[in-house]
Image (cartoon, grey):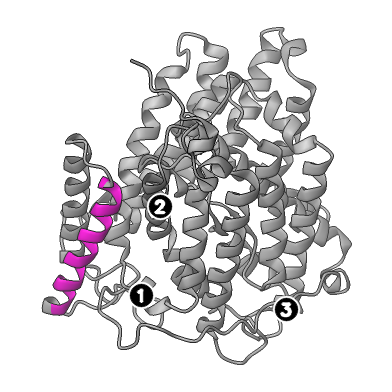
Amino acid sequence: MATQTPPLRSRGALDRFFQITERGSTVAREVRGGLATFFTMAYIVVLNPLIIGTQQDGTGSFLGGGSAPDLAAVAAATALVAGVMTILMGVLANYPLALATGLGLNAFVAFSVAALPDMTWADAMGLVVIEGLIILVLVLTGFREAVFHAVPAQLKTAISVGIGLFITIVGLVDAGFVRAGSGTPLTLGIGGFLAGWPTLVFVAGLLLTVVLMARGVRGAILAGIVVATVLAVVVEAVARLGPRLGADGEVRDPRAWGLNVPALPDTWIARPDFSLLGQFDLLGSFSRIGAVSVVLLVFTLLLADFFDTMGTMVAIGKEGDLLDAEGNPPRMRRILVVDSIAAAAGGASGVSSNTSYIESATGVGEGARTGLASVVTGIAFLLATFLAPVVSIVPYEAATPALVVVGFLMMTQVKGIDWDDFEIALPAFLTIVLMPFTYSISAGIGAGFVSYVVLKVVRGKARAVHPILWVTAALFVVYFAIDPLREAVGA
């Protein structure tokens, strides 16, 4: 017998605002989902400072203008922007999507932008702000939304499946379960064998989560993270493993912890340092590296950010059964507006472009269906500005089992692709496999778009291709050839 939606008067204001009952969820599920999402992406508070906070700009200065890294300030600003923008996503777009500094984008800013001769961190962050503002204009004019509508539904499904495989390999690699091999690109553990207590923690967390899910236990993913973290703390207290990497960034002990060392902190609360906020120069890069170089760098940032978010948005909606018949999420323009603002806000706050996180699928897998989950995740990030020592307790090895499980759930969508239709099957295949194999969502989407257009043309069906797909495919060709083009123009 179908469950009837309670009358509006009998539902609380929170339920009505977030449409919790209408989407088949409960407040408890949203809270669990929000916390699960936070724990699977809280690593960014620690990892972002290690990526952008330890690199010198073109003048020899570290982020913030000092002569030495200030990781505490980067961590505080990272958590602050993630918290504010994720809450905004929940309240404005009512979508279970969390945002934080984009991995890959931050590395590009650190190593390919800020490190250019004479460039400063403020100049680099100014380019990030410009990129965010351009994307916002594209959203407000309807172009970004039009691109999304122009993508065939089965390609959208392929994007979701590809992201599932992508986060699976991210989880396996971050946990050390899969590593670079001496004679192969990847291998099992160390030299083809599982070794080290952290790997045991990962396996135990994964098995526990799978067992709990198989038995229909609510909160299985979050419970797996918490129990694995407790196990990790016990293991570290007994074995004293320490971090895998030394202070110089070299491998100290391959059997040790990947990032966070799961030890109880000496202090649980730390006063946040928000000194990075506002440290950007919007136009300074033009005089330092020239207009041509600025355009190419902004274009690279823009294209990666543009399509990463589109893929993430689809994957989350598909997993949560939130998409309409055309594969579009509710309040799509609001989602894209918040994401665009987040990109600019990240640059203006000195922590690089903020973007939507596929780890949000963990919360959806836990039952989240509304923006209330995002609000919970955002509040957790705001608390993390004061509770950074607590966030650092959760190691990769305890959080990443959730990514593997969610990757499986997203992989099940592959049955929605018509594998007998070569014109859609090959682009879908390239989209799916290139995301994990290149470690890039944008690369997979680009390969799918370009191959789809090419196949339609060679089969005499060019008129069936939406005009916007022609444009985006051409842009991706430029994106893939950006380095040769940069050399050709002397940038």
| Relative height, residue 365 to residue 124 (above, below) | above
Residue for badge 1 = 390
Graded by Cα atoms within 10 Å as few (under 14), some (14 to 19) or many (20 or more), the crowding at tag 3 reads: many
Q: Residue, x 35% and y 82% (percent of image)?
A: 268
Q: Tell me how far mark 1 sits from mark 2, CA to CA.
A: 19 Å
Graded by Cα atoms within 10 Å as few (under 14), some (14 to 19) or many (20 or more), the crowding at tag 1 reads: some
User: Which numbered dot is residue 10?
Assistant: none
Q: Position of residue 180 (x, y in %)?
A: 33, 55
Inspect the image, locate mark 1, and give the three-letter code of the amino acid beneath it. Answer: Val
Question: Over which residues does the magenta segment extend?
Answer: 220-237
Q: Tell me how far mark 1 sits from mark 3, CA to CA.
A: 27 Å
Camera sees residue 176: no
Camera sees residue 157: yes
| Label 3 vs 2, first from the N-terminus | 2
Which image quarter holds the N terminus? Answer: top left
Q: Position of residue 336 (x, y in %)?
A: 68, 44
Inspect the image, locate mark 2, and give the three-letter code of the amino acid beneath it. Answer: Val
Give the label, 1 or 3, closer to the camera.
Answer: 1
Q: Position of residue 26 (x, y in %)?
A: 40, 41
Asked whether, in this view, residue 308 is left or right of residue 209, the answer is right
Graded by Cα atoms within 10 Å as few (under 14), some (14 to 19) or many (20 or more), the crowding at tag 2 reads: many
Disc 2 is placed on an element classified as helix
| Label 1 vs 3, first from the N-terminus | 3
